[in-house]
């Protein structure tokens, strides 16, 4: 499992990519096709037409870093991508599953808990203070 800070976003480029592209060619896809900031520190994932090769591009302290994986057997199992999407955002768990060849369509994830919105929380706090007799 990859451990990345929540501030690092992961983008999977939707179109098959020519794996002959290097740092500059992939950087052009990030900026021109995806419309993303190349220097953000986010990860940009590219998959070959045969789904047997993956490249991950990221900006790392003054230079572009490129990670490359080629499968000797099998194919990477991509998440569902709508026809009009240029890229799909993934989390680190999904990227780990992709790199391990796990079919994400068969994985059942529990619904994530999210904290209540601040407005709802303020209303709840205000109603409690009214009952207790707190004067603000």
Image (cartoon, rainbow, N blue to C red):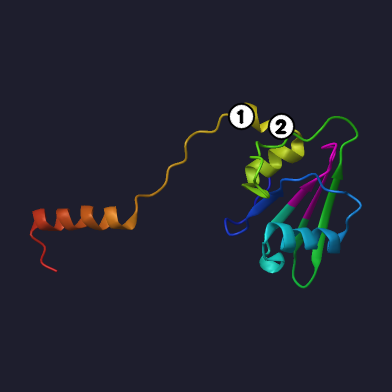
Question: 28 or 69: nearer the eye?
Answer: 28
Q: Earlier in the sequence, mark 1 or mark 2?
A: 2
Residue 85: image location, x then y, percent: 65, 46
Q: Is residue 52 magenta?
A: yes
Other-residue count near label 2 (Cα within 10 Å), few / some / many at <14 / 14–19 / ≥20: some
- Residue for point 76% across, 33% down: 101
- Residue for point 85% across, 60% down: 25
Q: In this view, does 104 lie above or below 24?
A: above
Point out the image quarter for the C terminus. Answer: bottom left
- Toward the bottom, the furthest residue is 62
Quarter where residue 14 is shown: top right
Q: What element carries label 1?
A: loop
Identify the disc placed on residue 102.
Answer: 2
Residue 54: image location, x then y, percent: 81, 45
Point out the image quarter for the N terminus. Answer: top right
Q: Is mark 2 on a helix, strand or loop?
A: loop
- Toward the top, the furthest residue is 106
Residue that mark 1 sits on: 107
Give the magenta range.
45-56
Q: Does the magenta stretch include residue 31?
A: no
Left or right: 98 as drawn, with respect to 5: right
Quarter where residue 40 is shown: bottom right
Quarter where residue 63 is shown: bottom right
Residue 77: image location, x then y, percent: 74, 33
Mark 2 and mark 1 in contact (Cβ < 8 Å)? Answer: yes
Question: 40 or 19: nearer the eye?
Answer: 19
């Amino acid at each position: 499992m990859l451990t990345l800070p929540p501030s690092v976003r992961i983008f999977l480029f939707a179109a098959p990519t020519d794996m002959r592209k290097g740092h500059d060619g992939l950087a052009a896809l990030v900026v021109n096709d995806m419309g993303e900031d190349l220097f953000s520190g986010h990860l940009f994932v590219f998959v070959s037409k045969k789904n047997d090769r993956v490249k991950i591009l990221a900006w790392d302290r003054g230079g572009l870093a490129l990670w490359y994986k080629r499968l000797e057997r099998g194919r990477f199992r991509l998440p569902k991508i709508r026809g009009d999407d240029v890229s799909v955002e993934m989390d680190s768990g999904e990227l780990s599953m992709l790199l391990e060849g796990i079919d994400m369509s068969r994985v059942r994830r529990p619904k994530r808990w999210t904290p209540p919105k601040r407005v709802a929380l303020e209303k709840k706090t205000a109603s409690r203070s009214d009952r207790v007799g707190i004067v603000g």
